[in-house]
Image (cartoon, rainbow, N blue to C red):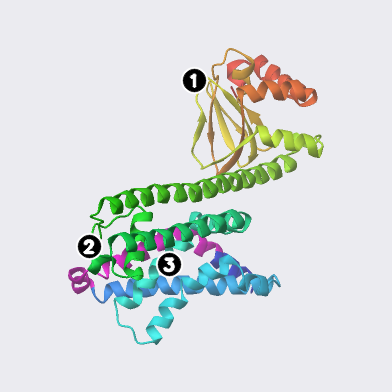
């Protein structure tokens, strides 16, 4: 009983995390507006304090769970702990240091890191940075070299005609940074023909260097995203009773064919009368099939949508999820390859399709 309450409380904080983050960040912005602060103070401070307590409780629950699981050291050095700590400690430290409101609440913008997608993106960025460290460092060195060259060159060319703007290397370095990043504030502009030609070269070099950076990061992010999706799909396929007869190499093949789809409750996956271009396997969750005047419930490892791919291509039923579900989607082209390469599973699908067709529209559970 002593453990059950913290577990339920942890689940509750996770469920309310998104609305609390939205409310807290909105409060951080509003508290900086003098007119709003004058109208809502001290209620606004009370709202932000309540959000801070919420995140503090979440951090303490994470600490408790890590201690119970005997992984306290691992949790303290994890990204999860860093995010939870940043939601609490910067504000507490600022308050202890005597910083007045509203400035004390500004670190609350870090509450955005508590959102699930933000955590995922940061974790992916960390893995990408570790994986692609060498090419990223190489591009950074190239950027630094071009930056220094641009600063020295513009200093030599423009220092006599614009000593106030380019009379020293530090001043020229500022121009090189704004030009190489193609920001170009306009406060420092070469006026000699050679200086303008140099500026054009530096801008083109900046585009090229940042293009390299973007290329490395985009490729690495895409590869990491595919890897994560493949791992998740592989785990689902391996655990699905429908695919239990497959060996590891066949599971890998199927995982490459299937596309995972996380579906909220109440989503209409297929609708009667529509053209069908894929079939679905239920990995988790439940769905209702509406056909004629009947409703039939589907649970794992059921599948649906195969009738349209084996027949006329038109859906013969409407399928709606009744709970959050994970579906594995098999497109038409991959469906045909699937049937050709896996005769045992293909026979199961065909047999189920025949059974459903024989039951006619009144008893057919999927289309």
Q: CA distance from mark 3 to mark 2?
A: 47 Å
* Residue 214 location (% of width, % of height): 48, 48
* Residue 44 location (% of width, % of height): 28, 72
Q: CA distance from mark 1 to mark 3?
A: 46 Å
- Residue assigned mark 1: 274
Q: Residue at x 51, y 56 (%)?
A: 142
Q: Rate crowding at label 2 as few (under 14), some (14 to 19) or many (20 or more) other CA atoms within 10 Å.
A: few
Mark 2 element type: loop
Q: In the rendered image, is residue 1 in sight?
A: no
Q: Residue at x 57, y 57 (%)?
A: 129
Mark 1 element type: loop
The foreground one among 177 and 222 is 177
Place residue 365 in its image quadrant: top right
Q: Residue 272, relative to residue 101: is it above or below?
A: above
Quadrant housing the C terminus: top right
Q: CA distance from mark 2 to mark 1?
A: 73 Å
Q: Mark 1 or mark 3: which is in front?
A: 3
Q: In the rendered image, is residue 331 in sight?
A: yes
The foreground one among 30 and 78 is 78
User: Viewed as shown, does residue 27 lie left or right of 337?
Assistant: left
Is-magenta flag for residue 29?
yes
Residue numbers of the magenta segment: 11-40
- Residue assigned mark 2: 161
User: Viewed as shown, does residue 82 lie left or right of 210?
Assistant: right
> Residue at the top extreme?
312
Mark 3 element type: helix
Say how many tags the image has. Answer: 3
Is-magenta flag for residue 357?
no
- In terms of sequence position, does the residue under pointer 2 or pointer 1 come before the other? 2
Q: Residue 219, relative to residue 188: is it above or below?
A: above
Quadrant housing the N terminus: bottom right
- Residue assigned mark 3: 110
């Amino acid at each position: 009983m002593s453990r059950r309450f913290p577990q339920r409380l942890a689940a509750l904080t996770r469920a309310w995390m998104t609305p609390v983050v939205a409310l807290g960040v909105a409060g951080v912005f509003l508290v900086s507006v003098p007119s709003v602060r004058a109208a809502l103070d001290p209620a606004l401070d009370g709202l932000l304090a309540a959000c801070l307590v919420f995140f503090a409780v979440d951090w303490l629950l994470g600490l408790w769970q890590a201690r119970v699981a005997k992984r306290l050291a691992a949790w303290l050095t994890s990204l999860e702990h860093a995010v939870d700590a940043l939601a609490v400690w910067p504000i507490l430290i600022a308050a202890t240091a005597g910083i007045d409101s509203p400035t004390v609440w500004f670190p609350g913008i870090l509450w955005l890191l508590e959102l699930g997608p933000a955590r995922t993106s940061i974790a992916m960025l960390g893995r990408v940075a570790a994986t692609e460290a060498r090419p990223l460092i190489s591009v950074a060195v190239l950027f630094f070299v071009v930056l220094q060259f641009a600063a020295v060159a513009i200093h030599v060319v423009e220092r006599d005609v614009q000593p106030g703007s380019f009379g020293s290397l530090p001043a020229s370095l500022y121009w090189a940074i704004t030009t190489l990043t193609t920001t170009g504030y306009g406060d420092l502009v070469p006026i000699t023909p050679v200086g303008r030609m140099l500026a054009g070269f530096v801008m083109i070099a900046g585009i090229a260097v940042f293009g390299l950076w973007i290329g490395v990061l985009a490729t690495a992010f895409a590869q990491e995203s595919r890897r994560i999706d493949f791992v998740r799909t592989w785990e689902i396929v391996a655990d699905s009773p429908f695919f239990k007869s497959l060996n590891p190499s066949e599971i890998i093949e199927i995982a490459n064919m299937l596309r995972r789809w996380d579906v909220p409750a109440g989503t209409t996956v297929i609708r009667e009368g529509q053209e069908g271009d894929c079939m679905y396997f239920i990995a988790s969750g439940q769905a209702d099939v509406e056909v004629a005047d009947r409703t039939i419930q589907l649970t794992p490892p059921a599948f649906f949508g195969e009738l349209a791919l084996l027949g006329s291509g038109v859906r013969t039923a409407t399928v709606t999820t009744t709970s959050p579900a994970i579906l594995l989607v098999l497109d038409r082209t991959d469906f045909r390859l699937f049937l050709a390469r896996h005769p045992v599973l293909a026979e199961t699908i065909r047999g189920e399709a025949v059974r459903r067709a024989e039951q006619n529209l009144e008893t057919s559970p999927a289309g």
